[in-house]
Image: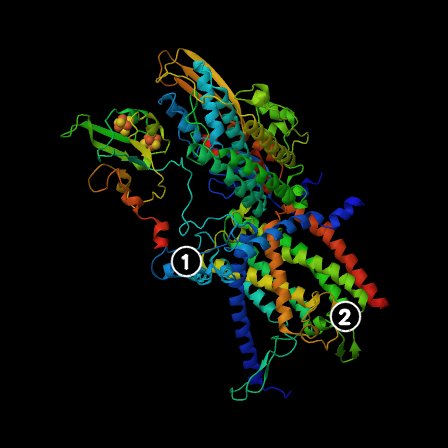
Amino acid sequence: MASFLRTLIPLDIYGGMKLTGKYFGKVLREANRARIRTHVVCEYPEVPVKLQPRFRGRLTLLKDEQGEIKCICCLACEKICPTQVITIEKGKKEGRKLPYPVRYDFEMERCIFCEFCVESCGFDSIILNHQFELAAYNREDFSIGMEGRFQNMFELSPVARYSVAEEAQR
Amino acid sequence: MTAMTLTQSFVTALLQIVVLALFVFVAVPVIVFAERKVIGYVQLRLGYTRIAGGLHGVTGGLNRLMWWMGKLPFFSILRGFPSFIADGIKLFTKEDIVPEKADWWVFHFAPAISVVAAFTVLGIVSFSPAPLWTWPAAVPIVGGLPFAGVISDVNVGLLMLVGVASVGVYGIVLGGWASNSKYPLLGGLRSAAQIVSYEVPLTFSLLVPVVLSGTLNFTQMSQYLSGAPIQTSAGPAQMPALAILPLFIGFFIYLTCGFAETNRVPFDLPEAETELVAGFHTEYTGMKFGLFYLAEYANMIIVAAVAAAFFLGGHHFLPFGLQRFIPPSVPVVGGASFGWFLLWMALILFSYLWVRATLPRYRYDQLMHVGWKWLIPLSLANLCLAALVRYFA
Amino acid sequence: MFVFLEFLVFKTEEMEINLGPQHPSTHGVLRVKLRLDGETVVQCTPIIGYLHRGVEKICENKTWFQGQVWTDRMDYVAAVTNNLGWAEGVEKLFGIQVPRRAHYVRTLLAELNRIASHQLWLATHALDIGAMTVFLYCFRDREAILDIFEAFCGARLTTTAFRIGGLREDVPPGMDRMVRNFLKAFSTGIEEYETLLSENRIWKKRTVGVAKLQAKDAVALGITGPVLRAAGVPYDVRKAFPSAAYAEMDFQIATRPEADTYARYLVRLEEMRQSARIVQQCLDGLPEGPVMAKIPKILKSEVCEVYHSIEAPKGELGYYFVGEKGGANPYRMHVRAPSFVNLQALPKMTEGNLLADVIAAIGTLDVVLGEIDR
Ligand code: SF4
Ligand code: SF4
């Protein structure tokens, strides 16, 4: 009898409906207005995403205070990289005692953002920056080098120069 | 009222049909929009808030506008509004693919069956007890004539409703069969069995109002069932107070069956997307798919309208014949109006979306189990109850 | 007797149908060949290999350090536990002693990942059965875990969280607060999943008694993880062969005797609760000290072989390494992927049931195709 009544009177369904109804009302009231929001979406292009300090984004070469490239071509990063996306050519530059990377190529399409390269570099000359908008229309745009048509390793790549968040704020 | 000439009645009906079609064509996108918004809100999302096209051009402008709308109290709910139009454009311009091995005629005919059945039924739904407006005398042909809230007030309204509505299932079954593909076939077969078996309790639960009111006419029934005292040809009448009970139970049975009839969660087996990809309309694209879509939502409107008319007080404020407690002299809530009808319809439609957001889906055999072992006996018992009430009161 | 009347009987035909590889509820690219009689499954053959990347072979060509990044991409919803297995396996091979603090942090992250993985399972399983809202509620809580991973190691899914010998860096400041906030939100979150599902009649109808797998069959097939525990076998690698800091933790193995889909659901919910308990204990008892052992810059192995298994969210995840003399990379590497083994139970669970139960069975096995195909 009890089970018959339980089947007849849908209390279980009522509980679920109450919960979803509660959230519906809350979001309806607070959508975009309350300071603490019930809804969990971030409205990404308009509102920039908050990243954690350790976020692993795109590889960047660092320069020291004099504007010199810090990298001294020890090739540690090239060796450790699991996907072999870094290609370095050792060279010389006038007025610089330490070796100078004539070529530092980075194939971003294959990079898996593991940060092994940064870890292995004993000279703190590369970091993974906080860039994550890395989509591009052309395959070549992913080949990032120090010079040439497709930008270099120091600034934002042409790929990431278009940031939706910035655009929205303008 | 003076008798209409043939031309006049013809033109009036035509105008009514146009208005009704417009109503459906507006209401369906609104329901779709509401569906996405309601389910979004339930799931702690915002539903859609932008349209494709990034931040440039016309779409960009709209996107910016919607971003600002989000900061305003009421307008934040309306974000994403251009998607009405976008959805329509998409459906109309999408490539129309007919599978090579499909049965061409049946494949094209099936969506039409669904839509025609749904629209025909809408024709006998009485949206308003009084004429919505009277044409000014200056209008040619129909000048001075009222514009009624129902296209055709047939005296076997309910019978026709149940009969024609069940024709719609042919669209689904044939569509599933004609696609010549396995998932649609399974979907179509499921829907045939489902709709046939749920038709029974649905009709039984609709018989409760019939038994209570003693008529099949849509308008008379809804007036009688509101509980308010009315004038009939046989003198003044009022629904007995006890009738609230069978009406109340009948409403829940009707709503459950209505969910099953319109293939909505938790009975959306014909198109269970996690099992059958998209069920009977897997192979349909473009506007043919759009017609199925339209029929489904039009059916939802019908179920909501019937529930509002028979169980939720017709064109009155209080449901289940509770209107008897409000004397007709009270302003607004005392009288009958189009607004109350729409309000109750909207609430039922909201419950559709709410349920969809909450409940899982039945399995095929369990659905039959629920239908045959629970709903049919329950609705039969309820019918007996109604008959007893009618007999003794 | 009435053979001569056979012509009166409807001739029926069995229908062959492909569930997948592109199907909304095969969780990736699983293909299941079904032979249906009406809607009843007569025969069910899972076909795999659509996501094969040769992880094991690749790892044989990568150094002991590098191989870890491939483990992220096997069970991509539980990358941290995969990392844990790899790191501990290699440490076992080289006999490296990991500091106690590192063990605790590893345990904490692995348990968080177990919660995340189970949440994703619940989300997709409920979605398969038609309950849409649980999906988003689970993802809401899972988001906090992914944020914690991002704070700890900079990535949300492909974490590469650990290093051979410990951790790369100590936990960031503020992570403690994040984890505590998560635990608080999670305790209400799990109540909500239960409100929506546990008592719901439709959920119960779809899961109770569906896709049964008795303990005898489960053991014979080598099933591990929640699927085995829901059949009443209390086997959990965390208790049986404790690694990391599990030996110091106080938790129970969740088991149920019913061996059906509903039991698996309850077992996983209980496991989430127990994981939350472990996380709490790790957080409260986090010892001070270094997080990295002293290890040589290049690891060179002797001739040896090692099998190390941990309890991944899906079951027993084992890493088998063979080292050669002076090898900077594994000579042979093999993964015992729990999803791969568990998937074998699918025909046993579904044959004779309805089509909709196949969906529930795939969901309840909690397979991740990245791990099956490797
Ligand atoms: S992040 Fe990893 S994959 Fe990318 S360049 Fe560095 S080492 Fe190579
Ligand atoms: S490890 Fe650092 S210094 Fe060495 S080559 Fe790479 S970037 Fe240059």
Q: For disc 2, does the CB lie below 8 Å from ligand 1?
A: no
Local secondary structure at mark 2? helix
User: In this figure, which residue is indicated by the disc labeled 2?
Assistant: B325
Subunit under mark 1: B
| Residue shown at the point (51%, 67%) measured from the top left | B26
Q: Is residue C154 left or right of residue C178?
A: left
Could you tell me residue A24's position as x and y percent? 58, 54
- Depth-wise, is mark 2 or mark 1 nearer the camera? 2
Q: Could one spot residue C39 in this view of the protein?
A: yes
Could you tell me residue C264's position as x and y percent? 62, 33
Which amino acid type corresponds to the residue marked 1 in the rendered image?
Lys
Colour mode?
rainbow
Subunit under mark 2: B
Q: Is residue B181 above or below residue B154?
A: above
Q: Is residue C119 above or below residue B41?
A: above
Local crowd at mark 2 within 10 Å, few (<14), some, or many (≥20)?
few
Q: Nearer the viewer, residue C22 or B264?
A: B264
Local crowd at mark 1 within 10 Å, few (<14), some, or many (≥20)?
few
Q: Is residue C333 left or right of residue A84?
A: right
Tell me where residue B391 sits by quadrant: bottom right
Q: Nearer the viewer, residue B377 or C229?
A: C229
First-in-chain label (2 vs 1): 1
Q: Which mark is residue A74?
A: none
Local secondary structure at mark 1? loop
Tell me where residue C293 sits by quadrant: top left
Could you tell me residue C327's position as x and y percent? 36, 15
User: In this figure, which residue is indicated by the disc labeled 1?
Assistant: B94
Q: Quadrant of the N terminus of chain A?
A: top right
